[in-house]
């Protein structure tokens, strides 16, 4: 569907924000705003990480203020609250419209000062806003709600922020995929489907994110674990085929999460779905926690040492620790960022990696959302699970544009003979794996065995520090 940009004349605040923007609005941002406006200022906008969806929220905020409205932006974490407030202050300087609820802002005696009111923007941490309904605006206060990382808000507690009193509503996400599968929560509040989607295929074609290459390093899994994997993946295949026969769903990677959620909501094939999910989770855990993947890291120390700016994703804390040990052995300075690391310490690590005082950040899950790290140019996916949302977010961490940054290289150790292996017949583009969209959108794809040290070294040399990225047209 094609959306035409609105011919409306911006109000004073929107015009002020537009003047502050250092580059022309991207085509997709204009289209997304037009789609939202055409849908009575209600809907979810999907846009991949790094493409500039926050600016859409800022423009919506300015438009709401011009209409005499209040604005509340809800975020899942304190670190994201800080980033939003910092960004808002760039565009609303001198207008006194930015405040915060929860996180580092407010307390029981001054929350009232940050309750949304006409001409004011406040940024709220979801936990605070969900558990203090008296902080919500009344029906008499016409208010815009911007729900950032909206996929987080379908649970019993957090969905309370989706108050029907909000006259205008905008959800922002890389892809609308609630972890619990409760799409109906969003359908009732924003509409059945996102009103606009901007995916990696288009973002890369528009040169709004960095082009990149992929190296798949094939490793040998422990034989006992491989047999267990084969057993569980066989069960998963059997139940998958049974579900397709009974329901006719596509089971494509980009649709299956929603398809399964809709079947559950309709009470269809529940027993088969439960069996399939259990089998997939078991097989996925075996792949994600395979220590053989960490062995591939030993082959990468020359690239990480030369380039730095590396992020390592691992869904296993044990594997993250093992990866750091291997990097240390290779003389690589790194830091692990876990859920409990204080914001001040995180910010120190972020400054250190940008300045190359440390060469790698390792994150079990803590950096999936709410972090802007423009300097990253190597993404190492060691032991990651199959959830599409996390993969999209993690890829976006590495593809953000920054002047002078080397063209990103995504490195994924894959287990031989599994759905991750491009040498398995019919799986050259990893069509059997949720990793397939990473491979399909890459400029170059290399596949090499971990034992082929010479082959790996040749590939790494071709992606050394001199491999700079082309100019981004939408930067």
Image (cartoon, rainbow, N blue to C red):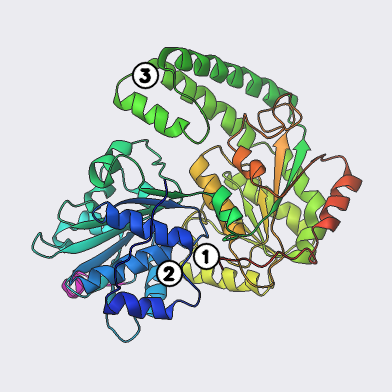
Front in this rendered view, residue 274 or 6: 6
Q: Which residue occupies the extreme right position in the image?
A: 454
Q: Which residue occupies the extreme left position in the image?
A: 140
Badge number at residue 392: none
Bounds of the magenta segment = 105-116
Give left or right: position of 210 versus 136: right
Query: In the image, what residue occupies the spot 26% across and 42% down?
Result: 156
Q: Is residue 422 above or below residue 391?
A: above
> Residue 36: x, y in percent?
31, 55
For the residues labelled 3 and 1, the Cα–Cα distance comes to 40 Å
Dot 2 and dot 1 residues touching (CB under 8 Å): yes
Dot 2 and dot 3 residues touching (CB under 8 Å): no
Identify the secondary structure beneath mark 3: helix
The residue under label 3 is 270
Neighbour tally class for label 3: few under 14, some 14-19, many 20 plus, Cα within 10 Å = some
Closer to the chain start, of discs 2 and 3, is: 2
Give left or right: position of 80 versus 112: right
The residue under label 2 is 83
Q: Where on the picture, by quarter, is residue 307?
A: bottom right
């Amino acid at each position: 569907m094609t959306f035409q940009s609105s011919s409306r004349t911006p109000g004073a605040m929107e015009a002020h924000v537009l003047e502050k923007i250092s580059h022309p609005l991207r085509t997709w941002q204009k289209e997304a705003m037009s789609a939202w406006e055409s849908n009575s200022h209600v809907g979810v906008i999907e846009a991949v990480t790094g493409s500039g969806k926050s600016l859409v929220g800022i423009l919506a905020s300015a438009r709401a203020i011009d209409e005499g409205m209040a604005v509340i932006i809800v975020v899942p974490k304190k670190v994201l609250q800080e980033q939003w407030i910092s960004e808002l202050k760039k565009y609303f300087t001198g207008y006194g419209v930015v405040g915060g609820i929860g996180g580092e802002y407010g307390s029981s005696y001054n929350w009232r000062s940050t309750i949304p009111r006409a001409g004011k923007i406040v940024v709220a941490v979801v936990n605070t806003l969900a558990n203090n309904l008296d902080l919500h605006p009344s029906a008499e206060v016409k208010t815009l709600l911007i729900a950032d990382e909206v996929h987080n808000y379908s649970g019993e507690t957090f969905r309370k922020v989706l108050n029907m009193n909000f006259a205008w509503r905008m959800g922002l996400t890389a892809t609308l995929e609630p972890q619990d599968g409760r799409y109906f929560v969003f359908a009732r509040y924003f509409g059945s489907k996102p009103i606009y989607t901007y995916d990696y295929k288009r973002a890369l074609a528009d040169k709004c994110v960095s082009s990149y290459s992929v190296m798949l390093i094939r490793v040998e899994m422990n034989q006992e674990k491989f047999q267990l994997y084969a057993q569980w993946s066989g069960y998963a295949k059997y139940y998958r085929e049974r579900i397709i026969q009974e329901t006719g769903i596509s089971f494509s990677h980009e649709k299956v999460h929603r398809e399964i959620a809709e079947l559950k909501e309709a009470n269809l094939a529940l027993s088969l779905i439960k069996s399939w999910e259990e089998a997939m989770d078991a097989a996925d855990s075996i792949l994600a926690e395979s220590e053989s993947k960490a062995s591939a890291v030993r082959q990468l120390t020359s690239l990480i040492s030369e380039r730095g700016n590396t992020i390592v994703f691992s869904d296993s804390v044990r594997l993250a620790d093992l990866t750091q040990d291997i990097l240390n052995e290779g003389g690589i300075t790194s830091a692990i960022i876990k859920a409990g690391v204080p914001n001040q310490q995180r910010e120190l690590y972020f400054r250190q990696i940008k300045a190359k005082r440390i060469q790698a950040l390792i994150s079990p899950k803590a950096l999936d959302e709410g972090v802007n790290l423009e300097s990253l140019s190597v993404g190492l996916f060691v032991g990651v699970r199959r959830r599409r949302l996390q993969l999209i977010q993690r890829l976006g961490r590495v593809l953000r544009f920054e002047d002078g940054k080397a063209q990103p290289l995504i490195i994924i150790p894959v287990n031989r003979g599994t759905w991750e292996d491009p040498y398995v017949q019919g799986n050259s583009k990893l069509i059997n794996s949720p990793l397939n969209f990473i491979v399909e959108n890459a400029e170059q794809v290399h596949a090499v065995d971990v034992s082929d040290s010479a082959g790996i070294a040749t590939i790494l040399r071709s992606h050394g520090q001199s491999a700079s990225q082309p100019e981004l047209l939408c930067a």
